[in-house]
Amino acid sequence: MIGIADSGATKTEWCFLNEKGEEKRVITGGLNPYLTGEEAIKDCLEKDLYPFIDNMRVKYLFFYGSGCADSAKRGVLQNALDEFFPKADISIESDLTGAAVALCGKEPGMVAILGTGASTCFYDGEQIHPEVLSLGYILGDEGSGARIGLHFLADYLRGGMPQDLREKFAPLCPYPVHEVIDMVYHGAEVSRFLGEMAVFLDGRMSHPYIRRILERQFGAFFETQVLPYGDKALEYPINLVGSIAYFAQEILREVAGGQGIKVGKILKSPMEGLVAYYQPKLSSLLREHTFVADDFS
């Protein structure tokens, strides 16, 4: 069988395909090597993945993940995956590469991730060309769940959030101010914490306060992370993946149109697009190996 993985800060979505094209899906914790050490990655694989899949039968693994663009950090993940999948040829690429493959296949286009974090690239149909640094939630990531959550949190703590929303937001932040400040400035998983604040968007995007924040954040996203690509940003539609882009796509498309940017495909998760990309390659990949037929039943 082959395995496909899409890994972010909070979770990893796995899909295993046998020679019949049958799927086995598993969700585990996020495996970003910037946030998770090698031993913790191994522990996650053993506890959360091993009970559901025969790791000895995986012949190829295509892993796309956040934190995998840096070769040193990628090596941490490579060591853990090599040990867990000893018979597999393993390819590790960035989550942005995974997004490009899922959204565009072999066609060129602008590509963006807009979920907990934000990043962009131009994809030529084979390789990604990220020309703008995303910089993370402190220096960049405009339009991301972390930046939107940060805006909500600051307004809530300073009294800038409308009263009708304050009462509903309170359960998301039941901490005293000093604890919130400590979590944001010294916490181990700050982007995840802030991203969780962004779930407050759900069902409330028509509220004028929330719509204003989204319009401001998306405007900044296009201005800082898309328009700097010059002619390519206006010539090619931008295709996006991620929960923020997916659930707020109506506002996102409006803001993009106002800046002369065309929006193409929007996916909540890259996995469906990745499976569609690898399904036609399944027979040729598995023919390259002698293997025992896999049965998920």
Image: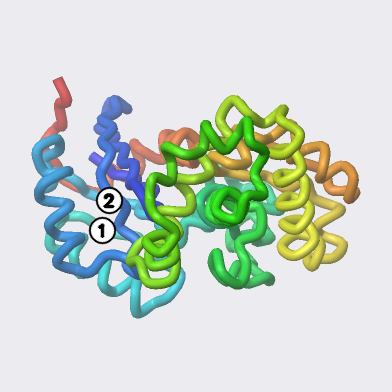
| Image spot of residue 53 (x, y percent) | 15, 38
Residue 255 picture quarter: top right
Inspect this view and state whether residue 284 appears: yes
Q: Nearer the viewer, residue 38 or 202?
A: 202
Q: Is 10 displayed left or right of 265 in the figure?
A: left
| Image spot of residue 167 (x, y percent) | 53, 33
Above or below: residue 226 compared with residue 156? below
Kindly report the distance in space between the C-alpha atoms of the residues bearing marks 2 and 1.
Answer: 5 Å
At a point 69% along the width and 38% down the height, the residue shown is 210
Q: Amino acid at mark 2?
A: Tyr
Neighbours of disc 1 within 10 Å: few (<14), some (14-19), many (20+): few
At a point 41% along the width and 61% down the height, the residue shown is 190
Q: Are marks 2 and 1 in contact (CB under 8 Å)?
A: yes
Residue topped by disc 2: 60
Inspect this view and state whether residue 64 appears: no
Residue topped by disc 1: 89
At a point 46% along the width and 61% down the height, the residue shown is 94
Residue 138 picture quarter: bottom right
Q: Amino acid at mark 1?
A: Asp
Above or below: residue 42 compared with residue 245? below
SS assignment at label 1: strand
